[in-house]
Amino acid sequence: MKTRLPWRCNLRDGRFRMLAGAILLVLTALVVPPLPLTRDGVQVLAVVDITGSMNVRDYSASGQPQSRLEAAKAALRHLLAGLPCGSRFALGLFTERRPFLLFAPVEVCDGFAPIDGALAALDWRMAWEADSRVSAGLYRAVEMAAEIGTDLVFITDGQEAPPLPRGQTPPFEGRPGAVRGLIVGAGGYALAPIPKFSDRGREIGFYAESEVQQENRFGPPPADAESREGYNPRNAPFGAAAAQGSEHLSSVREDHLKDLANRTGLAYAHLDGPASLDAPLRAAATARPVPGRFDLRPFLGATALLLVLAAFTAAPFGALSGRLTPRKA
Amino acid sequence: MSALLADLVRFGAERPTLLWLLPLALLPLAATPRRRTPFADLAAAPPDALSRGLAAALGAAGCLAVAALVIGISGPYRTGERITRTGIGAEVSMLIDRSGSMNETFAGRQPSGAEESKAAASRRILGDFVGSRAHDLFAVTAFSTAPMLVLPMTDRHAAVRAAIAAIDRPGLDYTNVARGLALALGQFGAASGDASRVLLLVSDGAAVIDPRVQETLRAAFAKIRPNLYWLFLRTKGSPGIADRPAGEDTPQAAPERHLDLFFKSLGVPYRAFEAEGPEAVAAAIREIEGLERDPIPYVELRPRRDLAGWAYGLAVFGLTLLILAKLAEVDLAQGRAAPPARRSERRMAA
């Protein structure tokens, strides 16, 4: 016996239309190419302070104390992994009074393994001098970033060693804001002892007060020198007593770093865990368009899935809406 | 079995959390997109195998469609492979002098006009060397007072060229070659097997190697056995490698000569090139290139394969069955269909 199918009724059925819509969406997903679009990449020079105070262990990772340098490395590696392809990354070290460029900008996807390896290998033992003239180093890092055409991420704890003469920050001679980027303050807010290493690189305790220059006694003496005990304009222009202070302990010098950020037109961020650099850098860096692709398929697929689920769950509602009463035959 | 497991772990998803939606694929077992028709007595329709089979097939089609869509939107892929092949090349660990004197010309002056500093010349020539052969691996170490690891051993030649591009920037203080040698030796991977290993020292001077460090270095050279090349960028008028000093022949008086003697005593293949100008540097590099022609294992990366297309294809298959069933529905309530409904209300019928 022949059964005539109710075509018109079947085609009008809402659930049929949902399924048909779903299959159309999925078929589109199978053929649609990814949309080309431009993404915001960055080109950045990261300069890492590797002076002694960066060995202070005032961070912690997985329950273990972690040095500022290790925390900075972890943050940079996290940052590197999140940069869109086409971004470029250059790496430099800072110690003494100048940055030292390890490598010029490298594309981050093709060069991920070597850049990540170079970041992992950063070590305080690479330092060629023990001084830490942060402001001089920062100013020259800004110049270097301008030369190679990148933004700057400068990671330091801001501790000047030796201390700045008379506590005065040297002037910045470049144009503030010409190079964009970020000064990152590494370290906790409480004073912590600085580890000391032997000439063979073994840790042998912490610096004591008398082992560190507490006051910069080069150049003219400060204004209050005359009131110091044992002051003599010729023989003891800084007073007779040895300088005392807390330069052998270290905390992040945020005021100094924020002042430097103001002078150079950079932004300031505090290093606070591996993911703490991503958002501040995105906000501070110049957006450089890099080609990207936008995959439409997940959206088409998700809509299709919703339609299919709707088709399946519509049945009870359809059944409730009046068709429970059999029509007259 | 383990091969199968190894194959299984290579599957992954870009948005794995979406896979938690997979239980939704059970929904077709409980609900149907087909019309529901009241039927006076289910017993009136005798159970038949075809109806049951169709019901099961359509239920499975529904499960398949939902599951395939969930997997599709989670972005499934098969991870890429690393295939080891053999090419011609060498593992080259470059140890580059970044002391301040490298920024002077071969005549020992500050470069002016068209003159090229030693650093700029080595940058240009080493830059050409990197990438001239596809399968060389490079590591870059710089040294002055302290050694600095610039790049670990890598086959990414663009990154190596970027590291070499940085070597004509102002240099640092002194030439402390011993620690640099130790770090550069450390760059040869233990797993590189029988690839030819090259330690290329580029410097314009030498330094006394502490006798205690000498022993450590000797042991490291004996273990790693690299071919050692010393590209000595000699400044005009300064003592050469072979020159004996006029007075006492001590390492302090003639560090270049004594470094050369130390290298010769290591028992590894060693050659020194004394270059007094950019052309001589280029000739030395060409010669090294010609000498190092051994097979080297290199890794070829197969990109990962996107499997979303397969998932969407399966979803299309399941949806097609559902749609066909939907089109073949009869409406019992309309009373047009006669005997036991086949396709339409199997679920009710069963």
Image (cartoon, coloured by chain):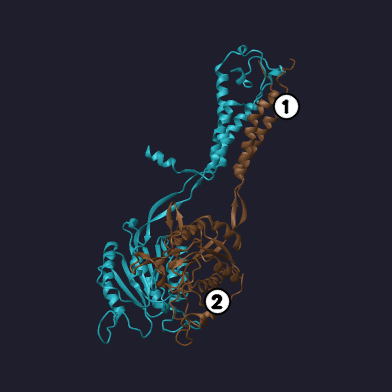
Residue carrying label 2: A170
The disc labelled 2 sits on which kind of residue?
Pro
Is there any visible trace of residue B272 in the rendered image? yes
Label 2 marks which chain's residue? A
Residue A183 vertical placement versus A317 (above, below): below
Chain A colour as displayed? brown
User: Which comes sooner in the sequence, label 1 or label 2?
Assistant: 1
Question: Secondary structure beneath disc 2?
Answer: loop
Q: Quadrant of residue A249?
A: bottom left
Compared across the picture, whether A25 is left or right of B107 comes to: right
Q: x%, y% of residue A120?
A: 43, 59
Q: Is residue A100 above or below residue A314?
A: below
* Mark 1 to mark 2 CA distance (whole Å): 85 Å
Q: What residue is rendered at 67% in x and 30% in y?
A: A16
Does residue B268 appear in the picture of this structure?
A: no
Report x, y in % for residue A258: 57, 67
Residue A204 x %, y % = 35, 65
Circle 1 residue: A8
- Picture coordinates of residue B112 (x, y %)? 49, 83
Within 10 Å of disc 1 (Cα), the crowding (few <14, some 14-19, many 20+) is: few
Element assignment for label 1: helix
Chain coloured cyan in this rendering: B
Residue displayed at 66% across by 36% down? A21
Label 1 amino acid? Arg
Vertical order, B209 against B323 (above or below): below
Which quadrant does the N terminus of chain A fall into?
A: top right
Nearer-the-camera pick, A69 or A82: A69
